[in-house]
Image: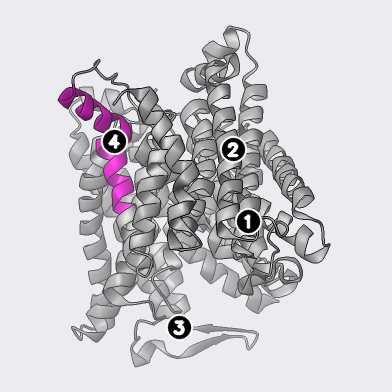
Amino acid sequence: MSPAIFKAALVALALLFPLAGGEGYFTHLAITMLIFSILASSLNLLMGYTGLVSIAHGAFFGIGAYSSGILALRLGVPFWIAFPLGTALTGVVAFALAVPSFRTRGIYYIIVTVAFQLIASEIFESWYAMTGGGIGLRGIPRPGRLFASKVAYYYLALGVAAVVHYGIVRIIRSPVGISLMAIRDNETKARMMGLNPWRYKTFAFVFASGLAGLAGSLYAHYMEYAHPDLFSFFVSVDLFLTVMLGGAGTVYGPIFGVLVLEGIREVLHEFVALRLLLFGLVLIALIVFVPEGLLRPLLRYARRRLPAGPGRATAGPLRGSAP
Amino acid sequence: MLQVLANGLVNGAILALMAISLTIIFSIMRVPHFGLGGVFVWGAFAAFFAVTRFALPFWLGVLGAAVSMALLGVVIERLAFRQLRDATEEAMFVSAIGVLIAMENGALLLWGGTTQSVPIPEGLRLVLSIGGVVYLPAMRVVIFVVTGLAFLGLRLYVKTTRMGKAMRAVAQDRVAARLLGVPIDRVASWTFALGSGMAGLAGALVGAAFTFNFEMGSLSVLKAFVVVVLGGIGSVAGAILGGFLLGVVDSYTLTYVTSQYKQIVAFSILIAVLVLRPSGIFGQRSLRADAPGTPL
């Protein structure tokens, strides 16, 4: 099967899928995967292409969900206004975190994002008046009558995800993306070549976190519900694992990661502890044995079996050697 | 007022114990071992089962918890960190988070999610009164004493023994130490044994003085990291001071400011210190926290 036919088949599958899925469980699963693919892809832009490991993606996901949900539920703002507003607000918060946090580096940077995640989680849990606390925010409206059904919402999510993925790929392949990678690989060198790392990193962080907020808004209005557990530290780690599993710094890796991990999440739906135990072990195994993620080795293997060009071998950006 | 201070100091002692275990592993092996949160939980469970199921005396149970966690720490280093020795700190952090999540949820699967307490002997159940103003259960005094002993013991070990000397050498310059024939693998094993043993000890003591459950580890280890940062990364004395400081601050915010947002204060301090004063509040050197090679 040539790549063009493969791609056409994939698009056809995505467009025709709801005919088979209907209002059932599989459409629900597909909507969740589409939303999580936005999260994984945007986190990948940060982790894989800019070299900023963020454990706060779940928090921004939540900020988007809660702000858009609260706007719609408490102020009666229609979805089409709450959705961009929630996204923009998340971007503003991300900017407020980005400015001070870029003074730190390496694990200290990661720790700042972890601390931010925990602060956000505590606010989601404790600000009863706004977020509903541990009960959660219930009754967030679906966007109008048009998107009340799952099939319709599937197309909405598909459209948004397609635009987002297209945009991210365009950024990665643009001069901006190349500058981001230059900063990831060697910030001093990038600066010497006249790039302003601070500006690029801020852009990447605000853009990626804003997309997480967008995904959050999309998610909240689909689930008609928001709860602190949906945006917790563990969700951030899950997202991180998703990107790692598929391969940070690859275009399709994170989407592959979403397919695998969402699959596991669904199978082990009832067994949260077992799933998290497994995720923890997989995380260790990945970083120790295959830091470049699973997709690339799998493709290399497939290419060896099928006659085609050789795969490229590169180390994942996370496992460079120590300075 | 004074009671709040006393409670804060007790919490601070626990935080300090955890912070010391984090800081020795981090400054010697460069591993940000957040998996110690899991070790902390398992230490509490180990002491609990030693006392309840195997009917060991309390002291032996606590000691057993520390020793078994030290051994487990060696195994964890082998499996999760040895391959990563020349990788970035980020990679080791990822592995450590994996250890933390796996251990906490492993504990939940194996031993359930109920909140329990390690039974303590009759002799430790009394409550000491200091001048009728401050009341302290004897168990909390024990925490104080044990933390002090652990600190002194560690200091003595690192300053006087051959292995301690090797540890200091590795902390200062790993490549040079290796060139001079310091057995890195053995230093790593001993370092992880020491750190994990202390984390296990902290878990057992907390489980006895208060209550414990499977998920108390992640918050404790993150708070311990706040303490490490406060005290200046790599400084054991700083970890102790930072522990008491955060314990007291936490205790006062809990009582007088807010019980709803109690973690926000700690984590805001963390962000502020990392951003504004990365060498820590008590750090003498004007080193940035991200500069390599912070000596013990």
Between marks 3 and 1, how big is the CA–CA gap? Answer: 34 Å
Could you tell me the amino acid type at mark 1?
Answer: Ile
Q: Nearer the viewer, mark 4 or mark 2?
A: 4
Kindly report which numbered mark, 3 or 1, lies closer to the viewer in this rendering: 1
Q: Is residue B125 magenta?
A: no
Residue wearing tag 1 = A119
Separation of disc 3 and disc 2 at Cα? 37 Å
Q: Which badge, 4 or 2, is on the more N-terminal residue? A: 4
Determine which residue is flagged by label 2. Answer: B278
* Same chain for the residues under marks 3 and 1 in the image: no
Kind of residue at badge 3? Ala
Q: Is residue B181 left or right of residue B84?
A: left
Three-letter amino acid code at the position of disc 4: Leu
Write the start and end of the magenta stretch as one range: A280-306
- Which residue bears the numbered disc 3? B138
Q: Do marks 1 and 2 both belong to one polypeptide chain?
A: no
